[in-house]
Amino acid sequence: MPRVHRVERARKPNAVVTAQDIEDAKSGKRPDAASYYHWSFRYGGKHVSKTYPKQSQLTQSEFLGAIYGLAEDLEALSEQNSFEEIREAVEDAKSTLEEQRDECESKRDSMPYQLQDSETGELLEQRGQYCEEMIQELDGIEIPGDDEAREEVLPEAEAELPDEEDIEDREAYLDNLVEEKLNERKQQVIDEIQAVEYQGE
């Protein structure tokens, strides 16, 4: 991967730093306004960004860019997402993996027979296999629907309710308990999802 460099203060505007950014940095309004990162590929020119580049931005491989990109999307999941949103993100990741698996298989199959066992052919085969393994791992993760999850945690939350005379608003207290249980359940699911990683090259 290319080396990433940070420029503390741009001297003139560029693709990500504006003239106003430079003025703000000089005046102290936003000291980091004129800072940026840049990196270059051997073939592909210079790239710049206001924020540190993601892994998917640091490769010219279409395959690895797609794999790193889906991992970044899954890493962005949090308790703020609903179970339905989490499930949708996983389905999107699986679709990407299926596309990349099929593309690898297609590329290898289109190679002359005597080259299919070459280093490139083996790499394509391994990439396809790793994609399939990730699909199966994601398939094995149980992601309940929002209503289903609430029904699952409700009995546990009700069991933790204090005696009625100890709380003023029993319903509100129960809602808070349920929300805590739901967030715990979401985090368990997210941890499982984020543990699914690409192991190849």
Image (cartoon, grey):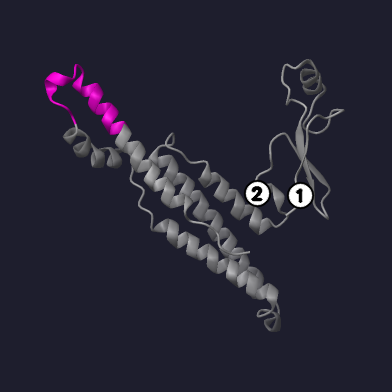
Q: Callout 2, which amino acid? A: Gln
Asked if 131 appears above or below 158 in the picture, the reply is: below
Q: Tell me the element at label 1.
A: loop
* x then y, percent, for residue 29: 72, 16
Residue under the image location 39 percent in, 47 percent down: 189
Which quadrant of the figure has residue 174? top left
Asked if 90 appears above or below 166 in the picture, the reply is: below
Question: Bounds of the magenta span?
Answer: 161-179
Q: Quadrant of the N terminus?
A: bottom right
Asked if 38 appears above or below 175 in the picture, the reply is: below
Q: CA distance from mark 1 to mark 2?
A: 12 Å
* x then y, percent, for residue 166: 16, 20
Label 1 belongs to which residue? Answer: 3
As drawn, is 97 to the left or to the right of 167?
right
Q: Residue furthest right?
A: 12
Q: Tell me the element at label 2.
A: helix
Residue under the image location 59 percent in, 55 percent down: 67
Which quadrant of the figure has residue 102? bottom right
Q: For residue 56, which numbered disc appears in the image?
A: none
Label 2 belongs to which residue? Answer: 55
As drawn, is 99 to the left or to the right of 21?
left
* x then y, percent, for residue 184: 34, 40
